[in-house]
Image: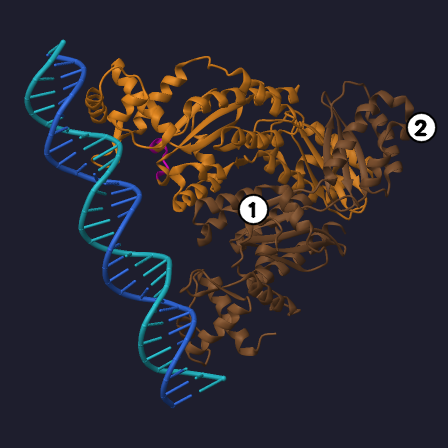
Chain colours: A brown, B orange, C cyan, D blue
Amino acid sequence: MLDERKQKVLYAIIKSYIESAEPIGSRTLTKKYQLGVSSATIRNEMSDLEDLGYLMKTHSSSGRIPSDKAYRLYVDELLKIETPLVDQKENEEIKEVLSNESWDMDEIIQNSAKILSALTKYTSIAATPKLKNSRIKNIQLIEIYSMGVLVVIVCNNGIIKNSIYRCDLDITQDELNIISNYFNKVFKDRTMDEILNILSLEQFKEIYKYRDFLKGLVDVIQNSIEELVEIELYSEGLMNILNFPEFKDVEKAKSFISFIEDKDLLLNIIQNTSMSKGIDIIIGQENVYSPLKDISIITATYTLSGRTIGKVGLIGPTRMDYLNLIRTLQIFSSHVSNILDLGDK
Amino acid sequence: MLDERKQKVLYAIIKSYIESAEPIGSRTLTKKYQLGVSSATIRNEMSDLEDLGYLMKTHSSSGRIPSDKAYRLYVDELLKIETPLVDQKENEEIKEVLSNESWDMDEIIQNSAKILSALTKYTSIAATPKLKNSRIKNIQLIEIYSMGVLVVIVCNNGIIKNSIYRCDLDITQDELNIISNYFNKVFKDRTMDEILNILSLEQFKEIYKYRDFLKGLVDVIQNSIEELVEIELYSEGLMNILNFPEFKDVEKAKSFISFIEDKDLLLNIIQNTSMSKGIDIIIGQENVYSPLKDISIITATYTLSGRTIGKVGLIGPTRMDYLNLIRTLQIFSSHVSNILDLGDK
DNA sequence: ATTAGCACTCGGACGGCAAGAGTGCTAACA
DNA sequence: TGTTAGCACTCTTGCCGTCCGAGTGCTAAT
């Protein structure tokens, strides 16, 4: 464990580096922060901190920059503070901005990413919920003249999915109602996963006379459910990273961007963080994906009726502004959860 | 009008510059292309072309680069060729890639932008149709237990919009059917614009007993239609721009990006191009928006049953590969139109 | 344990210099 | 008269040496 002065020095360096992105030396540090000792003393402390693995030099006579280990110490400290110092103004702002939302869950999540990146000036990501375990609330078939049948699936969490079943068969709305009533009986309170498993023509023996019609319909429903179960990943504010000096080199920027655009990889990484409630942070090389050993990812979960169903996060250089981002993300995820719960009432 | 040799020289310079982004000198030009004369002659021709406004120098002893006027001459020539040399392979490729599409028009347009940027490595944009003049085909109200009423609006061009009307009022599905039948009667064959104008409670005197219920419903319908009438602009492949040497300077890249992100401005610019069928090109300073005097925009229209309803385009440096992009865009827009017409059958 | 002082080390900015690519002009040529 | 070879001149780019400032690490004094 670091003694008090070492920690004070380390935090000062971290803060300075987060601010300026420049290595900092002992003399500048003493001028910027009141540390109560001379630059020579700081010099010794810095040397010790380097031996302990918290600081690094970019070259033999440069100032020091924090290592991943230092950031880890720093954020763990930040996360210990249970109730974050909620900035009332920011709180209201987020609430305000989120409140003009529609009730469509997909839209809420996607917009969340947009708002978050606009608010923080970082790149944001948001993953839609895994719907494996959500249930079908209602399924409706509606005749649309000359086009076919509109299939509307409503889930218990407010998600609505519709698709068109194009068919030439003559079928009346009354008959469609019979079929959809039957579906509702069979699907009632089953999870998506269960439905995918049992979905086949044999299930519908009792309405066998519609089998020609059902044949195609079952496919349409299956496709719809598969799309619902799929996790979607949105990212916004990609461009924000161009404002960070560490990405002024276009090649670096490009590699960052192709990383973000590889949704599968990204999804994998954030799904692997703990699904427990709260903030999760991956710093630099803690990330298994080596090409991007100098970016950090902060994620928060959002919940629906208490269950964790998705994630929202921010990505930036390891030097990111953890203090403020953690706070923003905490406020944000709780507001999103509230809105989702409201939609589910 | 330019004599044949001048034109030949000019086109060689244009092609070379499109390829390499480097100013080219007389000697290099003669080595690269068989022009049949010596570099000194070319030198004279280049000097003439500069006087005519087709070429520019980056500094007093540099090679020449084409001016906007030169590109204009060049693309006008290209556009004169009525039937483009359709590359059969590319044709098939685009067809293939587009064929896996859903029937949702919004999705088709958005995916078109994605595919186009992936195919060309340029930044693409696509504008959804103006639906002012499309008509409502069908409107349905569906009860969703404990959530309210699902409002489904189907347009004659296959677009479907649904929204939830949250209300606590007790109303049966039979009553909902009465209301939606009434709506269908009133709205039948009216355009969106017309409906927006007449939409008010007074219209529904005959079903006055539902007025409490209708009060909120009318708002929901109005919002839905307003969203349908709005033009949406998608852009994809923003990052592709970073591959062009002219944007290796991060500041330039940022200004390009903020231009693309200003959807209103962009929409304005592409809406102002002629709505006639075919390809439209804005080169450099032809664009009224001065901050980006060195980018070009190529747009093509797509149609639904013969009527032009939207645009799709590509954006890049003025030095963009007009020849191939025009061809790709032509093939592309005709395929998209085909798919839309199919969905409308 | 702390601090002042000093020698030493880098990176970055600046200036000069040579090489390379290009131009414009002139004079000779077919 | 149009074309070409030749030459002087220009401008960019990369390279090299130098200088300066910010930093470190060590030693000796407090």
The one nearer the camera, B264 or A29, is A29
Residue B286 magenta: yes
Q: Which of the image's four quarters has the N terminus of chain A?
A: bottom right
* Residue B175 coordinates in the image, percent (x, y): 81, 37
Q: Is residue A137 visible?
A: no
Q: Which residue is mark 2?
A: A206
Question: Circle 2 sits in a helix, a strand or a loop, which is it?
Answer: helix
Position in image of residue B263 (x %, y %): 49, 39
Q: Find residue A146 and report its horizontal and vertical position in percent.
A: 72, 20
Q: Amino acid at mark 1?
A: Glu
Residue at mark 1: chain: A
Task: Please count the marks in the image.
Answer: 2
Looking at the image, is B158 positioned above or below residue B2? below
Q: Which residue is mark 1?
A: A236
Asked if the stretch drawn in magenta spans residue B57, the answer is no
The chain identifier of the residue carrying mark 2 reads: A
Is disc 2 in contact with disc 1, using a CB cutoff of under 8 Å?
no
Residue at position x 49%, y 46% from top? A239
Task: Residue D22 in the image: state x and y as whole percent.
Answer: 36, 67
Q: Is residue A142 left or right of residue B230?
A: right
Inter-mark Cα distance, 2 to 1: 49 Å
Q: Residue at x 43, y 49 (%)?
A: A248
Label 2 CA crowd tier, 10 Å (few <14, some 14–19, many 20+):
few
Q: Is residue C30 above or below residue A30?
A: above
Q: Quadrant of residue A187?
A: top right
Taking the image as shown, residue B261 lies to the left or right of residue A184, namely left
Write the start and end of the magenta stretch as one range: B285-290
- In the drawing, does residue A139 fall left or right of residue B218? right
Above or below, D17 against B32 in this view is below
Q: Which quadrant would residue A179 be assigned to in this image?
A: top right
